[in-house]
Image: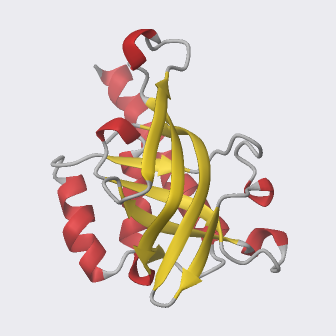
């Protein structure tokens, strides 16, 4: 019940197809795999209205290009949930979409891992990845939620995340 897996489970439970739920959600809930949330950008931070990582539709696929910082646990993950710009002409909070991207997809590159102060920086042991997406092709079925609905999907993740943080804190206090 740790982040980013709890939030990613929320997204998959609400917006994943039955196929994505079978392949990724149930194994995630069973603790059989790990996931990563890939949202923050070098130029825009965590502000989705400033994102420049894009996904352009090409037939039945989307092609993702850009860079993300602080993608927690990417080095261990089976998949990433990536927030990208798909509709730049829409109003600011309707430009982004989210995709499930298997970590082993060609073009997904973990440039380096960094720590956040409490993690060791030595030997690249940090758990927050700088990820580059270079012509990463994913099927349109990996879209989570409606196209242009990434901001709403992110809010769904955050709503559950607040409960999960409280749950973890209560557990620590009881322990």
Viewer-closest of 146 and 113 = 113
Q: In this view, does 121 lie to the left or right of 16?
A: right
Quadrant position of residue 22: bottom left
Residue depicted at 38% across the width and 67% down the height: 12
Viewer-closest of 79 and 12 = 79
Q: Position of residue 102 (x, y in %)?
A: 33, 59
Residue depicted at 62% across the width and 63% down the height: 84
Q: Is residue 148 left or right of residue 4?
A: right
Q: Where is residue 116 in the image (x, y as percent from the top left)?
A: 55, 20
Asked if 28 appears above or below 89 in the picture, the reply is above
* Quadrant where the image shows the C terminus: top left
Colour scheme shown: secondary structure
The number of discs equals: 0
Viewer-closest of 107 and 70 = 107
Asked if 125 appears above or below 44 in the picture, the reply is above
Quadrant position of residue 88: bottom right
Residue depicted at 77% across the width and 69% down the height: 93
Quadrant position of residue 64: bottom right
* Quadrant where the image shows the N terminus: top left
Viewer-closest of 48 and 107 = 107
Asked if 142 appears above or below 84 in the picture, the reply is below
Q: Is residue 79 left or right of residue 89?
A: left
Asked if 122 appears above or below 116 in the picture, the reply is above
Q: Where is residue 2 in the image (x, y as percent from the top left)?
A: 36, 38
Q: Position of residue 31 (x, y in %)?
A: 18, 46
């Amino acid at each position: 019940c740790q982040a980013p897996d709890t939030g990613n489970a929320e997204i998959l439970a609400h917006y994943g197809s039955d196929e994505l739920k079978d392949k990724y959600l149930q194994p995630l809930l069973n603790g059989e795999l790990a996931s990563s949330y890939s949202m923050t950008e070098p130029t825009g931070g965590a502000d989705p209205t400033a994102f420049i990582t894009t996904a352009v539709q090409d037939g039945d696929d989307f092609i993702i290009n850009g860079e993300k910082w602080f993608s927690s646990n990417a080095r261990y993950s089976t998949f990433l949930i990536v927030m990208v710009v798909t509709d730049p002409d829409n109003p600011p909070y309707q430009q982004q979409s989210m995709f499930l991207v298997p970590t082993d997809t060609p073009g997904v590159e973990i440039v380096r891992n960094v720590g956040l102060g409490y993690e060791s920086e030595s030997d690249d042991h940090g758990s927050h990845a700088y990820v580059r997406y270079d012509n990463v092709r994913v099927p349109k079925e990996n879209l989570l939620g409606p196209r242009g609905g990434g901001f709403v999907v992110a809010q769904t993740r955050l709503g559950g995340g607040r409960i999960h943080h409280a749950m973890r804190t209560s557990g620590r206090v009881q322990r």
